Image (tube, rainbow, N blue to C red):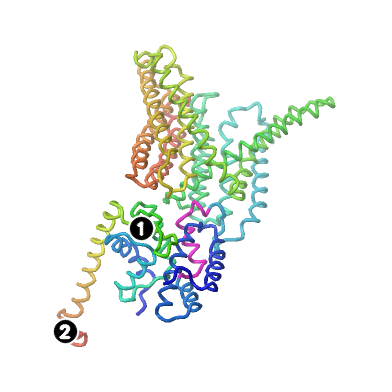
Amino acid sequence: MKIGKDLVAAAATPMVLGILADGESYGYAILQRVGELSGGELEWSDGMLYPLLHRLERLGHVESSWGASPSGRPRKHYRLSSSGRAAFAEQRQQWAVVSRALQRVWSDRDGGTDFAGAPAFGGA
Amino acid sequence: MADHLEPRIEDQISAWRAYVSRPEAMDGRDVDELEDHLRGQIDRLAASGLDADEAFLVAVKRLGGLDDLSREFAREHSDRLWKQLMIPGESRAPRTGGLVVAVGLAIGAAVAIKIPALFGIRFGEDGDFYARFAALLVLPFLATYFLVRRRASVPTIAMVGVPFAIAAIVMAVYPFAPDGATLVLAATHVAVALWIVTGIAYVDGRVRSSRSRMDFIRFTGEWLVYLALIALGGGVLVALTLGVFSAIGLDAEWFVEEFMVPCGVAGAVVVAAWLVEAKQSVIENIAPVLTKLFTPLFTLLLLAFIVAGFLQGSLVDGGDAEAFGQRDLLILFDIVLVVVVGLLLYALSAREPLAPPSWFDRLQLLMVVAALVVDIMVLVAMIGRIAEFGASPNKLASLGLNVILFANLIGAAWLQLRFTMRRAPFERLERWQTGFLPVYLAWASIVVVAFPPLFAFA
């Protein structure tokens, strides 16, 4: 399944904020985590993560510092700031609303008065 | 996972780095970050069985197209973008075409400023005419330059054109008294208002974007620097013209006054803008130096003034009798405050937004606080004068300006304090200052449109 570009773009910010809410991380690890969390379905070209991280940094949602990778190369680490935590909480609420609304739309379709479609989809 | 990959792959990574480093929207640190990512990806792919060459290719491919990537970086770091004005894949052309357009419009402005002469209005004599129309004769050419260069859409052209038309009607129709105070106020404020409207053309209609507004503020500062440089050269040219012709017994003064100076200034307005657009990396190095040089000096001036003001005691007595209440002094300090805010804006626009707060930011905080104190002193004296002598258009115009500056400085001081304490990101400071552009525009428009009738065009 290929997830549309707009949806990927919209999900990117809450995804990254959420991952950073678990603790400090760096670019490559964040992308790995996105892959794990979405079972590999949510993909955007790797480079695009970095402008996003820089934007979040400019907005003050994340802070960064340069450290070193285990092999001694420079590595930029990101962590959530307090305003980032607030932004994350807000985005989370927004997404919860959207997701609940969508769930309801679909469950109305599947299990509504018109019974026709329900067996085919198998209401788990 | 080895510290170093095979030399062959190391070479390829170096070549990749050299290639990626070219778009100027990405700086060395960004490339470091991408390289870290690339190496992470290569390690992982190699661990899963790919040979190093394949791993490198796949990793580079997954980073995404370089054009897309640098465009995204450019969009995020527009402060870097303006240095080079070229995003791959987007408008590469205007750079050379810009000169022809600029020269044409500069000549247009120079001619426009002399068109009134066809109707017998001479530059040196009829002061009223040029007070009314100088900005309206020149700035449309500058605005047109940007509209052409940005290939502006029709709504943007309307957004710029309509205010110019309204300003032209107001300035033409209002029956100003000769040499009246409201005429002088309207003339200066219409220039400010139309400059900001020209900014709408500069940002190609993206008036809501704080970053675009900041770009325009940066442009304004650099435009002033180039204009000053052109003025210096122009001064030499004028002096030599006068000298050469007087040496052969001809008086060139009328020519200098009637043609060289007015046409030169009008043309320079457009040419300076072209220089800013075309030669940005030159000034880019000067801006931080200028602000670092003048911020301490203006801070000292403000502090010295505060100390002197309190030592004189004129403010403490509440008496505006001696030094402080004088009108000229108040105007002078209005100008000082405007310059300080301008300096602050220029410094903010020249700053790397992600850099952590430094000594310079703390010094700026001191300057802003000192300016705030001076502004309060000026406000107190001004209100005192209005209470004693009644309101006049000049007094109300400068009172309004001071109130706006006061609001600006309060917010600026607070955000600067939070920024130096690392409590707020730099972006908040930026947004605070760029948010004032519409306020300035609104106030200037009020002074132009509402003040003259309110004060019977006196």
Question: Looking at this rendering, what residue extends furthest in the bottom direction?
Answer: A120
Which span of residues is magenta-colored? B63-81
Q: Nearer the viewer, mark 2 or mark 1?
A: 1
Crowding at mark 1 (Cα within 10 Å: few <14, some 14-19, many 20+): many
Taking depth in this image into account, of B369 and B446 the one nearest to the observer is B369
Tag 2 residue: A115
Taking depth in this image into account, of B253 and B350 the one nearest to the observer is B350
Question: Looking at this rendering, what residue extends furthest in the right direction?
Answer: B248
Q: Quadrant of the N terminus of chain B?
A: bottom left
Give the percent coordinates (x, y) of residue A41: 33, 76
Tag 1 residue: A78
Give whichever of discs 2 and 1 has the lower sequence position. 1
Task: Inspect the magenta stretch and tell me whether residue B162 lies in it.
Answer: no
Give the amino acid at mark 1. Tyr
Chain at tag 1: A
Give the percent coordinates (x, y) of residue A119: 18, 87
Crowding at mark 2 (Cα within 10 Å: few <14, some 14-19, many 20+): few
Taking depth in this image into account, of B362 and B171 the one nearest to the observer is B362
